[in-house]
Amino acid sequence: MWSSFGNTAPGAIEGRQRARQLCVCFAYTTVRRSCRSCQYLQPSSRILLFFLQTVLAECQDKALRRTAELKEQCQLEQKAKAHLEEVLRSDLEEKDHLIKTLETKVRILKTKETPGS
């Protein structure tokens, strides 16, 4: 049920994963509360508790890894954006210099043509 998402949007998948994690957290806390109230744990309760702890730890690890990946991706995108901005500014300065040079050449050519006419 949870493993096949089909052709759904990434946001919907993240929402489902978040909902599943909340269900696991709720089940874990429920089992923990019921275990505290009784002195002897049934073997099935111990197994369930262990399973829930494992799933919860895996979900948290996965979320932390994803967060780290997203932070790294964000940093790389910011560096790329800064580099691109620097390159574009350099290109603009170069074109500005070329425009000024051509304007100077045109001015010089106009002054040479005017007195000789």
Image (tube, rainbow, N blue to C red):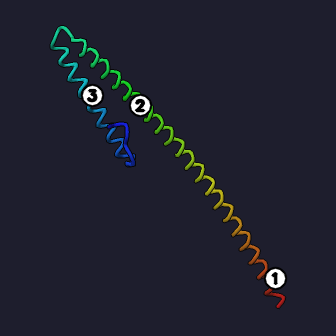
Depth check, mark 1 against mark 3: the one in front is 3
The residue where tag 3 is placed is 25
Left or right? Give the position of 10 relative to 108: left
Label 2 and label 3: CA atoms lie apart by: 15 Å
Q: Position of residue 26 (x, y in %)?
A: 23, 28
Label 2: how many Cα within 10 Å (few below 14, some 14–19, many 20+): few
Label 1 and label 3: CA atoms lie apart by: 85 Å
Q: Position of residue 91 (x, y in %)?
A: 65, 59
Picture residue at 41% right of the left edge, 31% below the top:
62
Q: Nearer the viewer, residue 93 or 51?
A: 51
Element at label 3 = helix
Picture residue at 27% right of the left edge, 33% below the top:
22
Q: Which mark is residue 62?
A: 2
Q: Amino acid at mark 1?
A: Lys
Element at label 2 = helix
Left or right? Give the position of 52 relative to 78: left
Q: Position of residue 82 (x, y in %)?
A: 56, 49
The residue where tag 1 is placed is 112
Up-down: is 4 above or below 9? above
Picture residue at 67% right of the left edge, 65% below the top:
95
Q: Amino acid at mark 2?
A: Lys
Q: Position of residue 112 (x, y in %)?
A: 81, 82
Up-down: is 28 above or below 88? above
